[in-house]
């Protein structure tokens, strides 16, 4: 399954407490709860392996899931879209394809390491294509005006919001009336036999992949004589535990309604492992 993406933080790009320093242990990984600074530092460490790990864990299907999320954003040429917790930028780049020509896409994240990867990826898309603008932002305090965008998305990042209701309200705030909010997230299947496979995959295989990635990166860093950033195994222990504590699809739909959205629906795909929620900002806000 896709690794989690960055979310909201209470500190700026250069601010962090000791627990957020590179190489610091992720003390909340086993519970699926980390402080905002820990989440940010974790993604800075994971940036170099984030994309290949996603591809390995999903057999490349995460691209199709992001395409479906972009479809549900209902954007077209000339529209403005925002991708929150953009990570390495895949969903923002997909949105850019849909709002071109004449549109605008902003991808924001609080992990500078991830943003660097996103910018490089967008630059490689080639000339003639609309490129998203990637910038630092706190998902819980978005630096954008009310009603500014036609759609806002978040892909595999809502689990990392330290305050989910606040994050959803911020997303709704910056969307114009009639615009869309889309949340793409991993969920826990309940039907056998997929539920059993899912538990084995997330509880055993994903942490093992994290340990393997960590060993590979440490070997490369040793050969290059560069400092080790470590903590890959802890990060991929956090992933399955963060999924377990995240609200079930029906509960998340209720949270979106409380955030002020209407016409809320969700679809389950990949056998119930992936949930894509969407809602509309009402023509008259409460």
Image (tube, grey):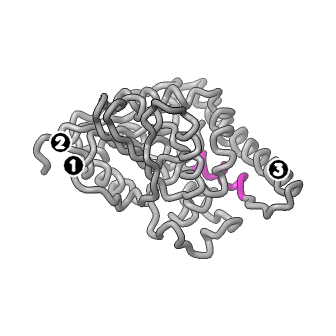
Gap in angstroms between the C-alphas marked 3 and 1? 46 Å
* Badge 3 density bin: few <14, some 14–19, many ≥20, Cα 10 Å: some
Nearer the observer: mark 3 or 1; the answer is 1
Provide the residue span drawn in magenta.
231-241
Measured as percent of width and height from the top left, residue 89 is found at 51, 42
**Helix or strand or loop: what does disc 1 sit on?**
loop
Left/right placement of residue 142 relative to residue 86 reads left
- Residue 215, numbered circle: 3
**Helix or strand or loop: what does disc 2 sit on?**
strand
Specify which label sits upstream in the sequence, 2 or 1: 1
- The residue positioned farthest toward the right in the image shown: 223
Specify which label sits upstream in the sequence, 3 or 1: 1
- Residue 177, numbered circle: 2
- Marks 3 and 1 close (CB-CB < 8 Å): no
Q: Residue at x 21, y 49 (%)?
A: 147
Nearer the observer: mark 3 or 2; the answer is 2
Query: Camera-side residue: 155 or 211?
Result: 155
Q: Residue at x 49, y 29 (%)?
A: 65
Which secondary structure is most common in the magenta stretch? helix
Query: Camera-side residue: 268 or 58?
Result: 58
Q: Does any portion of residue 81 appear in the rendered image?
A: yes
- The residue positioned farthest toward the bottom in the image shown: 18
């Amino acid at each position: 399954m896709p690794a989690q993406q960055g979310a909201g933080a209470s500190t700026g790009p250069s601010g962090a407490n000791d627990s957020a320093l590179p190489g610091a242990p992720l003390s909340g990984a086993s519970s699926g709860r980390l402080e905002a600074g820990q989440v940010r530092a974790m993604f800075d460490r994971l940036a170099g392996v984030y994309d290949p790990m996603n591809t390995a864990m999903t057999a490349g299907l995460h691209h199709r899931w992001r395409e479906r999320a972009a479809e549900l954003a209902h954007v077209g040429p000339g529209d403005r879209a925002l991708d929150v917790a953009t990570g390495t930028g895949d969903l923002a780049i997909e949105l850019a394809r849909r709002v071109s020509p004449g549109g605008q896409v902003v991808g924001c994240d609080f992990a500078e390491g991830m943003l660097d990867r996103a910018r490089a990826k967008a630059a490689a898309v080639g000339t003639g294509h609309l490129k998203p603008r990637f910038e630092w932002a706190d998902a819980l305090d978005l630096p954008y005006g009310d009603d500014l965008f036609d759609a806002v998305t978040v892909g595999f990042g809502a689990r990392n919001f330290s305050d989910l209701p606040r994050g959803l309200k911020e997303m709704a705030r910056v969307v114009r009336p009639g615009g869309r909010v889309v949340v793409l997230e991993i969920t826990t299947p309940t039907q056998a036999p997929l539920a059993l496979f899912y538990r084995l995959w997330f509880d055993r295989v994903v942490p093992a992949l994290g340990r393997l990635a960590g060993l590979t990166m440490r070997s490369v860093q040793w050969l290059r004589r560069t400092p080790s950033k470590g903590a890959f195994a802890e990060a991929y222990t956090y992933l399955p535990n963060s999924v377990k504590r995240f609200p079930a699809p029906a509960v998340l739909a209720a949270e979106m309604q409380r955030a002020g959205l209407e016409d809320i629906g969700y679809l389950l795909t990949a056998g119930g492992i992936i949930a894509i929620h969407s809602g509309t900002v009402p023509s008259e806000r409460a």
